């Protein structure tokens, strides 16, 4: 056989269904251990009953301009969801920055949680910082107020407006630092035109549609106040609404406010009041008299917390506490165009809102049963009703135009981001497609994250950068009558407790023991078995006393006779 002859090697052939194929390699080289993106997306798919996906009213398809043959699940980004459980109580408000990368949520627990989609993975779904807007120095009395509304600046995104159950609204940066705190007005002044700020609780607020430095707040002192965020000492304009309800003395509570852009109807300001009124002002003033007013838009003394204006400025939708949703035309601001029944949750959650879709082709709101209702903007009939948190009321809803995702906040403390892999981009979809972080002790925020300060256990703390040190750096001295309390850091939280010290450190119990009782417990033992005087027991002299008989008079009797 020559060297040029070819050798044929017989290789055993395995059937396609042979179990041995699972143990044999399919290719040479190192295999990539990347995540299974398709499996992760499939795990985030929502399980929705088929009977709840379509509304019961079949007549809505006749008045709709869209094709009725299209599937409801494909039209709206509701097929998948991302669940964030970062609050202990009900989530009352949510907002995304214009880019769709940072999420802020507010709750009844008085905290605003900041989430960054760029840093989250499927196994690390947590807030990178939790901020209490009214947390002061450690020596101050603890104060907490429920968060009514948070809203990112739609033109900048670097700050957001935070409104709590307090007369002072605040401007907070996207990193959680308080930038501006508006002044509180003088509550002893009767004329609201002369006050520099709200004198009672602020209920709602929004940003100017074209000026990133202007915002408006609505309060229970019957005023709307327009602020310049660069001037916190006084409002720019004050709009005093004079109620015409009997027995109100011209005052009522403003419950909601919305500011439309420069659409076909022009710049305008719309607000709702507790006496059932709905008022409209020109966005550029003057604010002496409203441009339009509807006295009985909703039932008086029922909280109207839902209010929004369409993108073209022609339509206004309101959700009242009288279990109705009404549609209004700003060009004929007298009677509602459409009114439908919808159970209200404003008696327990006053911030229950209603929102237009980004292109105003739909209206979305929540319900007391935990369902998301997507309504037709022309006749307010449901186009899609899907359960989000069954059994827990859905309070806050929002639809982001850039990433095409729907955000919801519920009474059970959950924030859910609904999305569709086909129609949505970035945001929650980007989080789900990342490789999950390996399990580590750092994944538990209770061990490594201080939610009040927003720092982890292995973080390097710069001297003077803690929240309690900022006032001292600005020249404000501490209270001389009260000792300074040391800042509680994650390192102090991991220190051993008193029980561990008492059991493992010698003589540690003597710190809290009475020294007299500690010596007296050895008295009996010292008398029965003396340690230092034991050698003198045998050498002590025997004591002798004088003996007196009964007849003899002792020395005491002699002294008594004298």
Image (tube, rainbow, N blue to C red):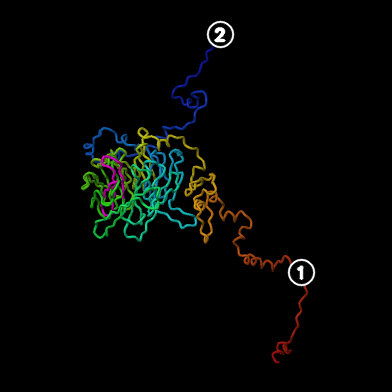
Q: State the image coordinates of residue 311 (x, y, percent, origin top left).
A: 29, 40
SS state under label 1: helix
Q: Is residue 497 visible?
A: yes
Residue 96: say if magenta: no
Q: Which residue matches tag 1? A: 536
Q: CA distance from mark 2 to mark 1?
A: 116 Å
Segment colored magenta: 256-283
Tell me whether the residue at label 2 lies in contact with that at label 1, contact meaning CB atoms closer than 8 angstroms. Answer: no
SS state under label 2: loop
Figure quadrant of residue 405: top left
State the residue at coordinates (28%, 57%).
Answer: 251
Q: Where does the C terminus fall, quadrant-wise? A: bottom right
Q: State the image coordinates of residue 292 (x, y, percent, origin top left).
A: 24, 49
Mark 1 closeness class: few <14, some 14–19, many ≥20 residues within 10 Å: few
Please indicate whether residue 561 sits to the left or right of residue 233 in the image: right
Q: Where does the N terminus fall, quadrant-wise? A: top right
Mark 2 closeness class: few <14, some 14–19, many ≥20 residues within 10 Å: few
- Which dot marks residue 4? 2
State the residue at coordinates (30%, 47%).
Answer: 306
Q: Which one is nearer the viewer's eye here, 156 or 116?
A: 156
Question: Of callouts 2 and 1, which one flags the residue occurring earlier in the amino acid sequence?
Answer: 2
Q: Which one is nearer the viewer's eye here, 316 or 31?
A: 316
Q: State the image coordinates of residue 425 (x, y, percent, origin top left).
A: 38, 34
User: As drawn, which residue projects farthest toward the top?
Assistant: 2
Q: Is residue 391 visible?
A: no
Q: Which one is nearer the viewer's eye here, 171 or 148?
A: 171
- Which dot marks residue 205? none
């Amino acid at each position: 056989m020559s060297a040029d002859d070819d050798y044929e090697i017989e290789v055993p052939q395995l059937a396609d269904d042979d179990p041995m194929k699972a143990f044999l390699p399919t290719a040479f080289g190192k295999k990539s251990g990347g995540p299974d993106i398709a499996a992760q997306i499939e795990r985030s798919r929502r399980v929705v009953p088929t009977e709840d996906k379509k509304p019961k009213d079949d007549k809505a398809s006749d008045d709709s301009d869209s094709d009725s043959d299209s599937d409801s699940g494909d039209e709206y980004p509701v097929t998948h969801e991302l669940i964030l459980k970062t609050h202990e109580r009900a989530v009352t408000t949510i907002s995304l920055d214009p880019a769709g990368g940072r999420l802020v949520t507010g709750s009844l627990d008085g905290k605003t949680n900041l989430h960054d989609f760029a840093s989250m993975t499927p196994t690390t779904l947590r807030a990178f910082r939790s901020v209490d807007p009214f947390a002061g120095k450690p020596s101050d009395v603890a104060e907490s107020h429920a968060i009514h509304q948070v809203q990112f600046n739609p033109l900048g995104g670097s700050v957001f407006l935070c409104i709590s159950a307090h007369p002072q609204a605040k401007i907070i940066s996207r990193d959680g630092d308080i930038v501006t705190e508006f002044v509180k007005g003088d509550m002893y002044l009767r004329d609201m035109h002369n006050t520099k700020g709200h004198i009672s609780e602020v209920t709602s607020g929004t940003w100017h549609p074209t000026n990133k430095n202007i915002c408006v707040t609505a309060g229970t002192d019957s005023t709307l106040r327009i602020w310049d965020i660069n001037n916190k000492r006084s409002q720019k304009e004050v709009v005093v609404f004079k109620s015409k309800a009997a027995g109100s003395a011209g005052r009522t509570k403003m419950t909601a406010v919305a500011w439309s852009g420069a659409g076909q109807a022009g710049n305008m300001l719309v607000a709702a009041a507790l006496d059932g009124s709905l008022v409209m002002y020109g966005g550029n003033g003057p604010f002496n008299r409203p441009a339009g007013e509807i006295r009985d838009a909703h039932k008086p003394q029922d909280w109207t917390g839902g209010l929004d204006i369409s993108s073209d400025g022609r339509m206004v939708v309101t959700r009242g506490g009288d279990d109705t949703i009404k549609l209004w035309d700003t060009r004929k601001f007298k009677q509602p165009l459409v009114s439908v029944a919808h159970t209200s949750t404003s008696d327990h959650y006053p911030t229950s809102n209603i929102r237009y879709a980004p292109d105003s082709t739909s209206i979305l709101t929540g319900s007391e049963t935990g369902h998301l209702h997507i309504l037709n903007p022309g006749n307010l009939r449901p186009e899609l009703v899907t359960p989000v948190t069954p059994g827990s009321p859905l309070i806050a809803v929002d639809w982001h135009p850039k990433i095409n995702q729907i955000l919801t906040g519920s009474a059970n403390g959950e924030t859910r981001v609904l999305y569709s892999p086909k129609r949505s981009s970035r945001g929650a979809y980007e989080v789900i497609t990342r490789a999950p972080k390996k399990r580590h002790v750092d994944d538990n925020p209770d061990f490594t994250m201080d939610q009040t300060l927003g720092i982890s256990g292995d973080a390097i703390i710069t001297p003077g950068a803690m929240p309690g040190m900022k006032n001292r750096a600005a020249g404000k001295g501490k209270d001389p009558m009260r000792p300074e309390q040391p800042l509680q850091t994650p390192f102090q939280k991991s220190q051993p407790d008193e029980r561990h010290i008492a059991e493992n450190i010698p003589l540690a119990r003597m710190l809290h023991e009475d020294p007299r009782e500690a010596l007296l417990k050895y008295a009996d033992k010292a008398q029965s078995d003396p340690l230092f005087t034991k050698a003198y027991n045998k050498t002590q002299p025997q004591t002798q006393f004088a003996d007196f008989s009964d007849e003899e008079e002792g020395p005491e009797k002699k002294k008594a006779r004298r």
